[in-house]
Amino acid sequence: MRHAHLVLTVDAETRDRIEADLADETVEEWLLDAVERKLDRYAEYEYADDCGI
């Protein structure tokens, strides 16, 4: 698996919201989970040409 490094900048309010939602994970783990959930949602969609109008 190839790895890439990402730099993410968030405002202080967003950082505070993330930290408030942490359970037993790091901020990095929380962010990775959020990205994976977003990508999984896209994978659920079937893209079809539905232009039969």
Image (cartoon, rainbow, N blue to C red):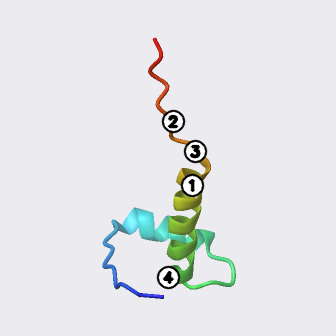
Q: Residues within 10 Å of mark 2 (few under 14, many from 20)?
A: few
Q: Is residue 10 above or below residue 5?
A: above
Q: Which residue is mark 2?
A: 48
Q: Amino acid at mark 2?
A: Ala
Where is residue 41 shown, x and y percent of the image? 58, 53
Q: CA distance from mark 3 to mark 2?
A: 9 Å
Q: Amino acid at mark 1?
A: Ala
How many numbered badges does the structure rendering display? Answer: 4
Where is residue 35 shown, x and y percent of the image? 50, 66
Where is residue 53, by image quadrant? top left
Q: Which residue is mark 3?
A: 45
Q: CA distance from mark 4 to mark 1?
A: 23 Å
Where is residue 50 shown, x and y percent of the image? 49, 25
Q: Residue at x 57, y 54 (%)?
A: 43
Tell which of 50 and 40 is nearer to you: 50
Q: Amino acid at mark 4?
A: Glu
Q: Which residue is mark 4?
A: 28
Q: Residue at x 50, y 73 (%)?
A: 31
Q: Residues within 10 Å of mark 3 (few under 14, many from 20)?
A: few
Q: CA distance from mark 3 to mark 1?
A: 6 Å
Q: Earlier in the sequence, mark 4 or mark 3?
A: 4
Q: Amino acid at mark 3?
A: Tyr
Q: Earlier in the sequence, mark 2 or mark 1?
A: 1
